[in-house]
Amino acid sequence: MWGQTQSAMISETKFLHLGPINKWLNTGITESLSILKEGVYGNYMTKESVAAWSENSQQYFDKARTEEIFAAIEQVLTEYYAFGEDIRTRDLASLSMKELAALFAEYKRLMGESQALFGSSTPSGTFAVEQRIKELVNNEEDFIQLSTPAEEDSTMQERREFRALARAGATDDELLAHARRYPALFFNTFDVQEALEYLRMRAQQEHDQAPLDFSQHLADIKKKHQEIYDAIGKDELPYFAGILQRAGLGRYRLKHVWSGIEFLCLDLLKEIAKRIGLDTRTLIRTYMHSDIEAFFQNGTTLTEQEIKDRTTCILLHWHDKRQERYFGEEALIKRKALLGEQKKKPESIKGMVANKGAIEGRARVVLVNDIKQMLEDANAFQKGEILVTTMTSPAMVPVIEKAAAIVTDEGGICSHAAVIAREFGIPCIIGTHNATSTIATGDTIRISETGEIEIQR
């Protein structure tokens, strides 16, 4: 899973799901492997772990438990934005080491709990619900329709609000306030000035465009939902479809926590980096939560060699209810031992249909790096090309607007790629796991209505 650039702390947080910080989801994962190779993250699970997680997704059949999960999502979101505002308005330099350590503990908790809750909307997390809906409707097109929320999601909300700001001639302060409301736009962006330059450019581009209004689009979705409910005539269908829709809406909002927390709390990370004696980017790329906790407890810092090793590779292996860590060359050796040699690239790929449509076109691979890279990718992307990516992000909307179709490594029926493809009315194949590592920019690919992707070489 994945294939994007991300920090050591976000990578380590994957394992917080499997320990005591995960209060809501009994995933059943017994073995998991996370690898951060030259800053690019990949995660692997055994088939047995995936099967167990899918089985345990039946927790949604318990209505009380379901409401606990959605209430927890709302609580984490409320605490997260309050924490971000606290960080922004505090004089962090005046805090004692003990006070700073307490803030970092809250930072870690929010990152961990948001990722754990994010897992409730993964393909494994909603597997039992999806299967029940499919049994009830017995029609793939109806299933796809019912997985689409009839409410404005956070991506729509961000686009609508930003368009209004742009048309009104927003000030820099208003643009930065918008960035704080939607920090996932700036995943891997550790310079506020870069974010501001992006927002200024985007505001200039959207200044003369019409206001965005999704009300008719959402009304059409709601009408279609009701038509399906009436045709099927089973009371449990609205319940299970509602869970899937709510999971999708929560998923987008939680992404602003776990993938946006580094941008929202950049001042906290800068202060910690300053006290350790590092630049912020090196801290984020190489230090894990446990390393920063060790610094606060006894002043321990990573050596130059340890930083070099972690820049090369970090491997975290969860099994037998414990975590093993490997770094540098040792991590590369362990990676080969666990995963074996890389197999020859296949000539075809299979994924899940998130929006139907057969199409052939030129592929362009766009990876999730930072906002600067996203701008370059958006400018290079040609109208009518097929977007191939690990998973779409809110910052990719300018690319998606030009895309003829979307193919992703990751995501399920609740994913951002799935829902936005339906909004734009373009074919979408999700969860291929290997599209970005198999398809190259410039390849001609053919997408079928059943989820097969053929590479024309």
Image: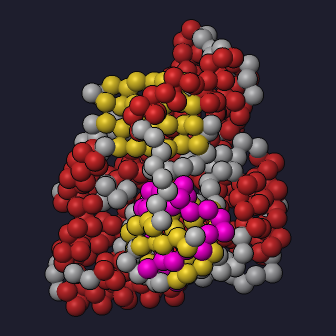
Can the viewer see residue 200?
A: yes
Can the viewer see residue 423?
A: no
Instruction: Using the image, determine if residue 103 lies above or below residue 121.
Output: above
- Which residue sits furthest top? 298
Question: Which one is in front, 229 or 122?
Answer: 122
- Name the residue located 48 percent from the left edge and 72 percent from the top edge: 454
Task: Please name the colour scheme applied to the rendered image.
Answer: secondary structure
Q: Position of residue 277 (x, y in %)?
A: 74, 19
Q: Position of residue 434 (x, y in %)?
A: 48, 57
Instruction: Using the image, determine if residue 345 lies above or below residue 225.
Output: above
- Name the residue located 36 percent from the left edge and 88 percent from the top edge: 224
Quarter holding residue 431:
bottom left
- Name the residue located 61 percent from the left edge and 23 percent from the top edge: 309
Residue 454 magenta-drawn? no
Q: Relative to residue 363, is residue 93 drawn left or right?
A: right
Q: Position of residue 48 (x, y in %)?
A: 24, 45
- Name the residue located 52 percent from the left edge and 30 percent from the top edge: 332
Quarter holding residue 432:
bottom left
Question: Which one is in front, 335 or 406?
Answer: 335
Q: How many marks?
A: 0
Quadrant into which the C terminus falls? bottom right
Q: Position of residue 83 (x, y in %)?
A: 57, 40
Task: Give the magenta part as a residue range.
Answer: 422-448
Residue 431 magenta-drawn? yes
Q: Relative to residue 193, is residue 65 drawn left or right?
A: left
Question: Which one is in front, 404 or 137?
Answer: 404
Instruction: Using the image, determine if residue 16 lies above or below residue 254.
Output: above
Q: Relative to residue 29, is residue 84 drawn left or right?
A: right
